[in-house]
Image (cartoon, rainbow, N blue to C red):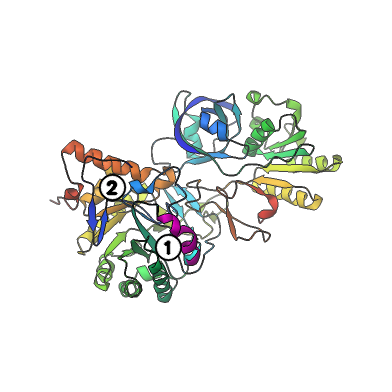
């Protein structure tokens, strides 16, 4: 893990208010595993003050890593204006990633909105192993065009809340069908809005399936110093709170109080 | 280890610092969280995360929210407790070639005294900073720090239980800082540090709920710097013991404002969340400032403020 200024190689709009940024950093690419995140300083000023955490959404070649983000506020607004060739301070990779289950087990990746980001990286690293990717969005305009990932489009099963693409409804509806359809056990990996992850965790518990969740929290340092990113732990955990940055962001669903 | 042209050494009370830049409590952990990114030995000292007699889980999330040029936190003094601190963290402090200050907190006078006494076994800790100003806990903390008599009582209680120099960290959440600074000085504190965070609040207009689990929190970052500087200035003109300036310092320029206003040293806090090397950059910036102006000794700048 390092803190360094890295070059922005591209910063392209890939859906409504959604951008894919490629950053050049050999050290990050070398150490990065799916589920890891980086803390990005969106400018050199102090307003907004804090770095922004982003899941690593994949790597390209030996020296580019990707972040996928939606413009939701001041920080991401500034980020969307960054031109290729600019340099940004990046700290990472940070956190604990997904544990990839031994070969032979099929995986099901369940993402909601920008929660697809760490799962795209996971899909990239699952190459050859069987998996399905269920992705939920509000509407068709929010679905990112992800040509750079080299994933088979048929891998994705889409749900939209307004029915403008794929299944009309929630991505967890697709998961219920998938779980019912598959004969053998499947390992679940999920990231997205809290209610969605909560439902995935609940399904996993009902079906006795292993489930790893990638959590998000307001975060200042990303390194365990501020203790700002606490989430409540389940009674199965020997602690009251877990820190998303150093205990996670990827945790077994059973360790989290939903 | 960096080397500098300027003589950056400062003395405050019984402490001698290689430079006047300290890491503020709660922003540099126990010195190990940032160890592979930032060497605390390059700073004049480090104030460790607050320690209480018993472990504390801290406040319910969300615990932080960003604000204009700052952040609001309600961590709630989450910490591992003094016993685990002595066992797990203190041995690692030996490697640090800088002044290490423990920050202590109690619910009651007795707890303040008990934590101070427990730390007597640790020669690695040079001094104690007493937190009478945490806005995010229900009992103790700021309840002591807003009353001159109570502030003095905590100071005396800690002094009765330690031979280490005692620094008292004051709260800005008072009408007038001067009587409290005076009371703490009279009680025997070696120095005072200020300010702790300013209480604040943020509301989510969509959910109509407070953004913090604790409802209110403590504001830090550049947004509070002018308030901190004004209070440091008032304290410097009230007491004879050294004053450590804290509050929104992110650059050497900011640190210089406090030193010129009379602070004997400064603490860098929230800036470390953005850049774990912020304190070290500030030390370098102080050296550059002095070099460019032919100032041989940084100490000559302290209290050099010209008013009218």
Distance CA(mark 1)–CA(mark 2) = 24 Å
Mark 2: which secondary structure? Answer: helix
Camera-nearest residue between A25 and A7: A25
Residue at numbered disc 2: B255
Residue A160, image quadrant: top right
Mark 1: which secondary structure? Answer: loop
* Quarter of the image that includes the N terminus of chain B: top left
Across and down, in percent, residue A34 comes to: 63, 37
Q: In this view, does A115 lie above or below B23?
A: above
Q: Is residue A17 left or right of residue B306?
A: right
Across and down, in percent, residue B249 comes to: 33, 48
Q: Is residue B285 left or right of residue A136?
A: left
Camera-nearest residue between B244 and B122: B122
The nearer-to-camera label among 1 and 2 is 2
> Which residue is rendered at x = 67% and y = 30% of the image?
A124
Residue at numbered disc 1: B135
Query: Counting residues from the N terminus, which is met first, the one under dot 1 or under dot 2?
Result: 1
Q: Decide whether residue B90 is among the magenta residues.
A: yes
- Please provide the residue range marked out in magenta: B83-94
Q: Residues within 10 Å of mark 1 (few under 14, many from 20)?
A: many
Across and down, in percent, residue B35 comes to: 44, 47
Camera-nearest residue between B28 and A174: B28
> Which residue is rendered at x = 62% and y = 40% of the image?
A35
Cβ atoms under marks 1 and 2 closer than 8 Å: no
């Amino acid at each position: 893990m390092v803190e360094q200024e890295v070059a922005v190689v591209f910063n392209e709009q890939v859906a409504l208010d959604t951008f894919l940024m490629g950053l050049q950093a050999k050290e990050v690419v070398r150490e990065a595993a799916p589920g890891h995140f980086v803390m990005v300083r969106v400018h050199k000023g102090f307003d907004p003050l804090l770095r922004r955490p982003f899941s690593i959404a994949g790597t390209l070649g030996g020296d580019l890593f990707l972040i996928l983000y939606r413009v939701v506020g001041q920080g991401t607004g500034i980020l969307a204006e960054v031109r290729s060739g600019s340099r940004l301070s990046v700290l990472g990779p940070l956190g604990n990633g997904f544990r990839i289950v031994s070969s032979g087990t099929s995986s099901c990746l369940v993402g909601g909105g920008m929660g697809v980001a760490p799962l795209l990286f996971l899909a990239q690293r699952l190459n050859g192993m069987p998996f399905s990717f269920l992705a939920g969005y509000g509407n068709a305009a929010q679905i990112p065009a992800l040509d750079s990932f080299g994933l088979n489009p048929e891998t994705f099963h889409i749900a939209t809340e307004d029915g403008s693409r794929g299944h009309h409804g929630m991505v967890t509806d697709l998961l219920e069908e998938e779980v019912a359809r598959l004969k053998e056990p499947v390992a679940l990996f999920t990231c997205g809005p809290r209610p969605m992850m909560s439902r995935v965790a609940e399904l996993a518990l009902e079906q006795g399936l292993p489930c790893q969740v990638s959590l998000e929290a307001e975060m200042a340092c990303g390194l365990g110093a501020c203790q700002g990113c606490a989430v409540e732990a389940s009674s199965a955990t020997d602690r009251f709170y877990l820190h998303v940055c150093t205990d996670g962001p990827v945790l077994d669903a059973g360790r989290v109080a939903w | 280890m960096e080397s500098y042209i300027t003589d950056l050494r400062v003395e405050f009370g019984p402490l001698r610092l290689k430079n006047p830049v300290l890491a503020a409590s709660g922003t540099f952990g126990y010195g190990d969280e940032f160890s592979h990114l930032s060497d605390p030995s390059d700073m004049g000292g480090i104030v460790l995360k607050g320690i209480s007699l018993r472990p504390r889980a801290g406040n319910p999330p969300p615990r932080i929210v960003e604000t204009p040029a700052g952040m609001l936190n309600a961590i709630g003094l989450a910490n591992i407790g003094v016993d685990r601190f002595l066992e797990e963290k203190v041995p690692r402090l030996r490697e640090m070639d800088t002044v290490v200050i423990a920050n202590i907190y109690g619910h009651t006078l007795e707890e303040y005294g008990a934590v101070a006494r427990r730390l007597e076994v640790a020669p690695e800790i040079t001094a104690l900073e007493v937190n009478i100003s945490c806005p995010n806990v229900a009992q103790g903390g700021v309840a002591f720090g807003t009353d001159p008599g109570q502030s003095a009582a905590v100071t005396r209680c800690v002094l009765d239980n330690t031979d280490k120099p005692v620094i008292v960290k004051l709260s800005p959440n008072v009408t007038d800082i001067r009587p409290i600074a005076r009371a703490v000085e009279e009680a025997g504190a070696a120095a005072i540090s200020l300010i702790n965070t300013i209480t604040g609040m943020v509301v989510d207009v969509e959910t109509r709920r407070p953004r913090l689990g604790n409802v209110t929190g403590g504001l830090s970052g550049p947004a509070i710097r002018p308030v901190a500087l004004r209070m440091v200035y008032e304290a410097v003109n009230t007491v004879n013991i050294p004053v450590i300036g804290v509050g929104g310092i992110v650059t050497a320029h900011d640190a210089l404002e406090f030193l010129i206003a009379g602070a004997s040293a400064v603490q860098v806090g929230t800036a470390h969340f953005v850049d774990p090397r912020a304190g070290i950059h500030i030390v370098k910036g102080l050296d550059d400032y002095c070099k460019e102006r032919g100032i041989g000794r940084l100490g000559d700048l302290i209290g050099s403020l010209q008013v009218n």
